[in-house]
Amino acid sequence: MSNSAPASSTEGQAPIAHGPFAVAQGMAGDAASTDALNRLSRKLAGRAGSAKAQRRMVELLKSAVAAVRVQDYGRGAERCLEVLQIDEKSGLAWHVLAICQEKSGHLAQALSAYEAALTLMPEENNIAHDLSRLAQRLGQLEIAEKLLRKFLAVEPGHVDATNNLACVLRDANRYAEAVDVLRDMIQVEPESALLWNTLGTVQSDQGDMATALTFFEEALRLEPDFSKARYNRANVRQPLGDLEGALADIEAALPGAEPGYETAMMTMARALLRLGAGDLEGGWADYEVRLSPDMPEAMHAVVDRPRWDPAGQPLKGLKLLVIGEQGIADEMVFGSTLGDLIEAVGPDGQVIIAVEARLVDLFQRTFPKAIVGGHKAVKMEGRLYRYIPFMEGEDAPEADAWVPMASLMPVFRPTVAAFPDRAGYLTADPARVAHWKAEVEALGPGLKVGLHWKSLVLTGVRARYFSSFERWKPVLTTPGCVMVNLQCGDVSEDLAAAEAAGIRLWTPPIDLKNDLEDLAALSLAMDVVIGPGIAGTNIAAAVGAETWLIYAPDDWHLLGTDHYPFYPRMRTFARAFDGWDAAITDVAAALAERASG
């Protein structure tokens, strides 16, 4: 079973390219482990010798379990379905079917099958444990916690289940409770590498990398071949400045990773480490794993054209559909190659671009020779499917092939030197820019500062990438500045707290989440836009606004340099995970200098 819950996929966010590394969370147990399958076999052995239909069902279930042992989950599922045709109330068939569906990556179907099995066999506590792990993986933390507490009420002191409860509490940002659960169990089982690893993930999620490193090293002392702990140690060594050690840990962890998601997750982490080290060739090659079906948030493009083959299909004269993959920030970053692509296909070719619907006008204005339309994401059975509605029907543009937007990077940005030195590449609406400049000027004298401070998604590990609003006070109170709220989402509490403290932020009368054309124009009307690496700051940098970015120590976008090659004119401020105050002080000092200059 996979050992990490997928990141949330939310409009405007980028769970793979811009998000943090996933941790190997240490959820313990495997519904298809040898012990679990042996337990099922023993149950089946006790059911042999009855009526003909029962014997047939037992034979089919034995065949299903045998198929699971050799990882032939499709055949196992088929045998279970045959059993359910005979008796739809066979709890064992539902349980084995759930295991097959989970191992095949059909998580929503697996969830339904586990629930059916538990309903039919409520006394089988192991099903509750299996179901809790899947619920955690799907982000259904309340359900997972209830199931684990139910399991532990029957089997108190169970190490795996206690560990898993701590994982769920950690994912719910209930860090103190998670530590309490782990500390109590470690006092009983101090030699458990599993518990030390999970304790490390609780600390790393909060940004305390030095303490996390100590716990991961204890896990590895107890179990040197523990690949999850070695992978997790890589993820804390990199922000602590040991990039070489982090890469070595990833290489050592990969051979011991479970097939499927865990191997894909570690390959993705290696991609970002390689890119962060400036190894673009190796990094872009590994980055293709983002599209693997083993990645829960991978994009599955629903198109009837073949995938473009850079080795076998010259670009000149090609009609190529480019599909944006993740969130808005990624479409800003990876869309920077589209001008190169349009030039490469030439006048006899055609570039068709599918982007987030809120960005269509921005991209069409920038690339008038291209055909630009919106894509649509639909989540089914835990998978993200990307449809291209404007490519359907009789009037649809013709395309010879399609390509994921980020897969253009190794073609046009194989080295850092290949990144152009320019102040943005997208063209905001001139009329809207003029409108917002007039609106902003009416606010009175002073440097106009647009501020972003958080992501719309702050669950789990993502929280360590964003600061509380209160910490921004040194910036908000910088003399000679007029503060403008560019933060999307409900920030009414933050703004009320600022007003109570005598600090005023002007909020423009637009929907900052959805009116992205206005957000782009408004960013250009600012003297400077400041914030972390989210959609809003990426839009500002992409249209050429003066943008200041506070970046995390594991941000791979620097590509081994001291700046952002994607936006080379953007000013950057480094921070440690526990160094928000120092970083904001640096920004405030630079802002004061800018305002007085």
Image (cartoon, rainbow, N blue to C red):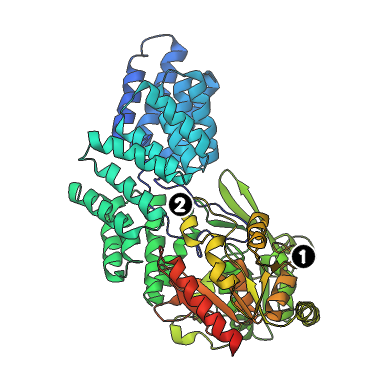
Confirm whether residue 430 shows in the render.
yes
Vertical relation: 91 (above or below) 499? above
Mark whose residue sits in front, 1 or 2: 1
Residue at the spot of label 1: 510
Residue at the spot of label 2: 294
- Write down the quadrant of residue 502 in the picture: bottom right
Q: Earlier in the sequence, mark 1 or mark 2?
A: 2
In front here: 201 or 264? 201
- Quarter placement of the N terminus: top left
Mark 1 lies on a secondary structure that is: loop
In front here: 499 or 371? 499
Vertical relation: 3 (above or below) 297? above
Separation (CA) of disc 1 from disc 2:
39 Å
Q: Position of residue 505 (x, y in %)?
A: 68, 68
Q: Position of residue 555 (x, y in %)?
A: 44, 69
Graded by Cα atoms within 10 Å as few (under 14), some (14 to 19) or many (20 or more), the crowding at tag 1 reads: few
Amino acid type shown at disc 1: Ile
Amino acid type shown at disc 2: Asp
- Write down the quadrant of residue 339 in the picture: bottom right
